[in-house]
Amino acid sequence: MKQTCVLAALAMGACVVQAGDWTQWRGSNRDLIVTETGLLKAWPEGGPKRLWQVDLPGDGYSSPVVVGGVLYITGNEGNMGYLYAMDAKTGAGDRWKLAYGQEWVANYPFARTSPTVVGDLIYVTSGLGRLVCISIKDRKIVWEVNAHEVYGGRNITWGIAESPLVYDDKVITQPGGENAGVVALNAKTGALVWRSAGLSERSAYCSPALITLNGKRQLVTQLEDHAVGLDPETGAVLWKHPHRNRHAVHPNTPVLCGENKVFISSGYGYGSEILEISGNTAKAVWTEKSSDNHFQGIAIYEGRIYSSGGGKMSCFDPKDGRRIYDVPDARKTTFCITPSGMITYDEHGGKVLLVDIKSNPNTPKVVSSFAVNYGNDQHWSSPVVADGILFLRRGKGVAAFDIAEK
């Protein structure tokens, strides 16, 4: 019955959100944590059953999102960016695509950003700084804003790579213009709500987070020279902390790790920091140069921090930054954490691991593994789990694997 309802909704073009959906970058809660249960605790030899594998018309590094039985993903064909939609169960069905504008075609010329789905609308940011709102029902663009042109933005070395954050009928973009390092637009119309006066730093590939620090909601992101906290209603700068590596590359979403602390990490030898926030002040209470997370993601799970950096996946104590352990066989790896274990996807050779991090809390164990042997170019997309299915993207190639217990 559930499948019938999903297919009917898909045929009508409607968006029916279900438990277990993955609606945006890093998951529906933007935290890399999968809450759905009933997942395999070990995979068969050679990996879980592959349900389907398709080659998209366009290339991309972006991860898919899955909402109401439909998978949405971005890719570029030549210099044009497209949003693709397909049946998440079969890879086919009511499949469609829509051009959302010119994409980044310089170095590493693949689409970078994941869509964000809110209700019947999808938000996509291009590598050239164009923010687009798309109607799922009508399959057309509702509004679009070239944030660089309108707000004096400047592109960066490897193209804009932020995935849209939407809250309270606002959508956030980071053009990096004069008094417009960060901008909030009306999510229904694209009209300006606020711009961050006094903050003119360029974007730095970071997808921002909406978190609560000291009982107060804050918009936290990393720009060219600083990690910053903003008032989410006005854009006022609440605090700034110097944080810049030699390329101004900070693609990891900041993670809350306590009532008043934030964990951030950047690659190229810069390393990780835990920042303590008090009023308008941010100070580093712990730093670790050896754990320099390039863009693999950070999560906090059951009171511990997980971050890939320095050629290893590590677990840290958020109280003092102490390294508890390194995950065996996991090197430079994207990941998510499920009730059945951590799923990692390694840049080196495309190896996928299922890691037990619960049975012995200080000794992780690799339970199962397999290699992604389809697609093209780098293994840079993040694993996605929705409705008992693991989705893995490599370039044009996307595949779905059944990881649900029977």
Image (cartoon, rainbow, N blue to C red):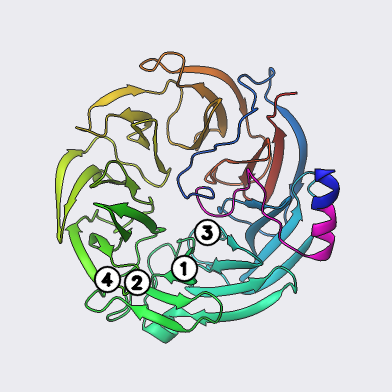
Does the CB distance between marks 4 and 2 fall below 8 Å?
A: no
Provide the residue span drawn in magenta: 7-26
Give coordinates of residue 130: x percent, y percent.
51, 75
Residue type indicated by callout 2: Glu
Magenta-colored segment: predominant secondary structure: loop
Which residue has dot 1 on it? 168
Amino acid under disc 1: Asp
Which of the pair 394/339 is nearer the observer? Answer: 339
Eye-nearest disc, 4 or 1: 1
Occupied quadrant, residue 340: top right
Q: Could you tell which of marks 4 and 2 lies nearer the N-terminus?
A: 4
Q: CA distance from mark 3 to mark 1?
A: 25 Å
Task: Identify the disc placed on residue 233.
Answer: 2
Discs 2/3, front: 2
Label 4, secondary structure: give it.
loop
* Neighbour tally class for label 4: few under 14, some 14-19, many 20 plus, Cα within 10 Å: many
Is 304 magenta? The answer is no
Q: Residues within 10 Å of mark 2 (few under 14, many from 20)?
A: some
Instruction: Give the residue pinned by disc 4.
Output: 201
In three-dimensional space, the C-alpha distance between marks 4 and 2, rounded to whole angstroms, equals 20 Å
- Give x and y (percent) for residue 32: 48, 42
Q: Residues within 10 Å of mark 3 (few under 14, many from 20)?
A: many
Cα gap from disc 2 to disc 1, whole angstroms: 9 Å
Nearer to me, 237 or 101: 237
Dots 2 and 1: beta carbons under 8 Å?
A: yes
**Residue found at x 36% / y 23%:** 326
- Nearest-to-viewer mark from 3 and 1: 1
Task: Identify the residue at horizontal 74%, vertical 50% (top origin).
Answer: 69
- Mark 3 highlights which residue? 112
**Please, what is the three-letter code of the amino acid marked with disc 3?**
Arg
